Amino acid sequence: MANHKSALKRVRQAEVRRLRNRYVAKTARNAVRKLRATTDKAEAQKLYPTVCSMLDKLAKKNVIHKNKAGNLKSKLAHHVNAL
């Protein structure tokens, strides 16, 4: 590990970001699972915009790829419409 002051700061910042990214990604994955498990159409329609927003934010911050977010949103929309 480097001994430069700026390198040490980068290490600290990277760790904080890694933990934050892990948390938000896991939260979004759980929300996707919850939406997929929903069988009530009204509840699914209420949940869908929230989940889409979470996925868009993850893609914007490069936690997940933008195409992955798009694919997930598409599949979830298909699920909600099929209910």
Image (spheres, rainbow, N blue to C red):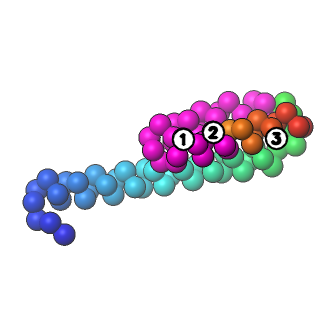
- Residue at 19% across, 69% down: 1
Q: Is residue 38 above or below residue 48?
A: below
Per the model, the C-alpha gap separating discs 2 and 1 is: 6 Å
Q: Position of residue 21 (x, y in %)?
A: 45, 50
Furthest residue to the left? 4
Closer to the camera, 80 or 38?
Answer: 80
Give amino acid for label 1.
Answer: Lys
Circle 2 sits on which residue? 70
Residue at the far front: name it. Answer: 67
- Tell me, yes or no, if residue 24 can be seen here: no
Q: Quadrant of residue 50?
A: top right
| Crowd tier of the residue under label 3, counting other residues whose Cα lies within 10 Å: few below 14, some 14–19, many 20 or above | some
Label 2, secondary structure: give it. Answer: helix
Residue 74 in percent (x, y) is at: 72, 38
Q: Residues within 10 Å of mark 1 (few under 14, many from 20)?
A: some
From this view, report whether residue 13 is shown above or below residue 57.
Answer: below
Q: CA distance from mark 3 to mark 1?
A: 20 Å
Expressed as whole percent of the image width and height from the top left, the position of residue 39 reads 87, 43
Q: Is residue 44 above or below residue 18?
A: above
Q: Which residue is mark 3?
A: 79
In the shown orientation, is residue 25 left or right of residue 74? left
Q: Tell which circle, 3 or 1, labels the residue nearer the N-terminal end.
A: 1
Amino acid at the residue labelled 3: His
The disc placed on residue 66 is 1
Mark 3: which secondary structure?
Answer: helix
Q: Is residue 5 left or right of residue 75?
A: left
Q: Are marks 3 and 1 in contact (CB under 8 Å)?
A: no
- Residue 83 quadrant: top right
Which quadrant would residue 43 be assigned to in this image? top right
